[in-house]
Image: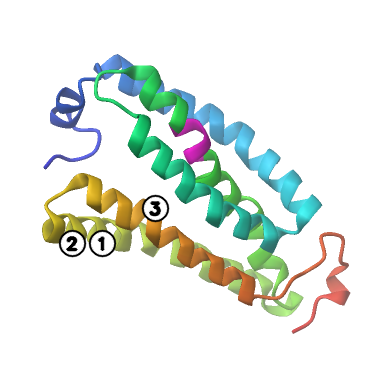
Amino acid sequence: ACLVGSEMCIRDSHLTPYQAAEIMLISSAIGYIAYPLAGWYGQKIGRRNAWALSSVIMPITALIFLLVAKPGNFLSVLLPYIPLYFFSNGTFASPGFMYVSESFPTRVRGTATGFNMAIIAASYAIGGFLFSGVLTLTHSIYLTWIILAIILPFGSLSILLGKNIPPDAELEEIAW
């Protein structure tokens, strides 16, 4: 086992430190493009629907990443990572945050959005514990990836239980 980003992980993955840094730099560029693009299509199809769509597409891109990425082959890691990062980060961060903030009455919108951000921060720790726990149980990085990156994200489809707020609804029209 290794810590993500540690030299041991980079050495075991057969990517050079330069290639790993290049992937991180490209990830930042993807985020720069993903957030406004995801915000745009969230505005077109509805933020809840954009979140649900990503809940289906993201596990598919995670499966493609698992099948295509090969140690030491930079492009085989980078190319499937681009859509994976876009749908796992861009959509949840852009239309996802907007959906949460617009789903609450104005008087509590700041508190609700702040609570959502707190849940996201907590999810980083919870995700780390889940990863460690599942990896300990399965002893397989591949099975851990299948459970946490391919199967678990389908749980986000529970967003479909939330209110469908039309993309151009006025704040006054949004009420529980």
Say which amino acid is labelled 3: Ile
Q: Is residue 83 magenta?
A: yes
N-terminal-most mark, 1 or 3: 1
Q: How is the image coloured?
A: rainbow
The Cα–Cα distance between marks 1 and 3, rounded to whole angstroms, is 14 Å
**Which sits in the foreground, 143 or 33?**
143
159 with respect to 64 (left or right): right
N-terminal-most mark, 3 or 2: 2
Which image quarter is the N terminus in?
top left
Q: Which region of the structure is painted magenta? A: 81-85
The residue tagged 2 is 133
The Cα–Cα distance between marks 1 and 2, rounded to whole angstroms, is 5 Å
The residue tagged 1 is 130
Toward which corner of the image does residue 13 lie, by quadrant? top left
**In the image, residue 9 lies at what x, y percent?**
18, 31
Q: Residue at x 24, y 24 (%)?
A: 71
**In the image, residue 87 lies at what x, y percent?**
54, 45
Magenta span: predominant SS is helix
The residue tagged 3 is 150
Say which amino acid is labelled 1: Leu
Numbered disc 2: secondary structure: helix
**In the image, residue 140 lies at what x, y percent?**
16, 48
Q: Residues within 10 Å of mark 3 (few under 14, many from 20)?
A: many
Q: Is residue 50 magenta?
A: no
Q: Residues within 10 Å of mark 2 (few under 14, many from 20)?
A: few
The Cα–Cα distance between marks 3 and 2, rounded to whole angstroms, is 17 Å
Q: Residue at x 72, y 52 (%)?
A: 42
**In the image, residue 67 lies at what x, y percent?**
35, 35
Numbered disc 3: secondary structure: helix
